[in-house]
Amino acid sequence: GQQLNQSPQSMFIQEGEDVSMNCTSSSIFNTWLWYKQDPGEGPVLLIALYKAGELTSNGRLTAQFGITRKDSFLNISASIPSDVGIYFCAGQSSTNAGKSTFGDGTTLTVKP
Amino acid sequence: SQTIHQWPATLVQPVGSPLSLECTVEGTSNPNLYWYRQAAGRGLQLLFYSVGIGQISSEVPQNLSASRPQDRQFILSSKKLLLSDSGFYLCAWSVVRDEQYFGPGTRLTVT
């Protein structure tokens, strides 16, 4: 089946630093999605991307849909303590309509 | 606005006991519904998804089953729980493309 490689697996950063994480796939995706999960809660959708090359922002978060349609990036600028959590990428292909493939997540720790 | 409910929030069950987890969605019609399981510190494993009443697709052969008796109700069940069924169970819905919205989850511990 389809697999997503999400990296890094974990990050420890200082408050105020910028963060970058990415997902790559061996398959082409039509949609890329980024979620954040706080401890003990369900994931929350942050950004949805639908076109190759698309760059979308949500506050301090910016995500890009890779031109090859096989990767996506999420950047967080000027991190704050509440950015702590697990960030998941997810992709959907035309052969798997209605179902997303999820990455294993990037665990972010922000030191005040 | 749309909301999704899951209950119970936490559950401790002995091995061999039955299971029933419920998920309901408000504020939307004919959503796609999903059940995921998340092991501690791990990613999301899709267990079941449904595109309509009575339509269930199973993603992983296992000890669990799902049912959708009403448009906005999704139930996860087991006749006999195994230790390996422990985990964090998440229900999600989508109507627009594949933007999924998750419930608060149920923490299941099988002892």
Image: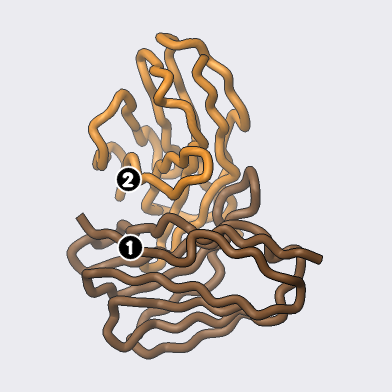
Closest to the observer, B93 or A11: A11
Q: Amino acid at mark 1?
A: Leu
- For disc 2, the marked residue is B49
- The reply to the same-chain question for discs 1 and 2 is no
Distance from disc 1 to disc 2, alpha carbons, whole Å, reads: 20 Å
Name the chain letter of the residue that bears numbered label 1. Answer: A
Which residue: 51% across, 76% down?
A: A74
- Color used for chain B? orange
Closest to the observer, A75 or B31: A75
Give the left or right position of residue A100, taking residue B44 as reference.
left
Which residue: 53% across, 64% down?
A: A45
For label 2, the SS is strand
For label 1, the SS is strand
Quadrant that contains the N terminus of chain A: bottom left
Residue B9 placement: quadrant: top right
- For disc 1, the marked residue is A4
Q: Position of residue B57 (x, y in %)?
A: 24, 42
Residue at the extreme right of the image, as rendered = A112
Q: Which mark is residue A20?
A: none
Residue B96 placement: quadrant: bottom left
Which residue: 49% across, 42% down?
A: B90
Instruction: Using the image, determine if residue A6 lies above or below residue B33.
Output: below
Q: How is the image coloured?
A: by chain
Q: Is residue A44 visible?
A: no
Closest to the observer, B49 or A19: A19
Q: Amino acid at mark 2?
A: Tyr
Residue mark closest to the camera, 1 vs 2? 1
- Color used for chain A? brown
Residue A32 placement: quadrant: bottom left
Quadrant that contains the C terminus of chain A: bottom right
Q: Position of residue B43 (x, y in %)?
A: 44, 49
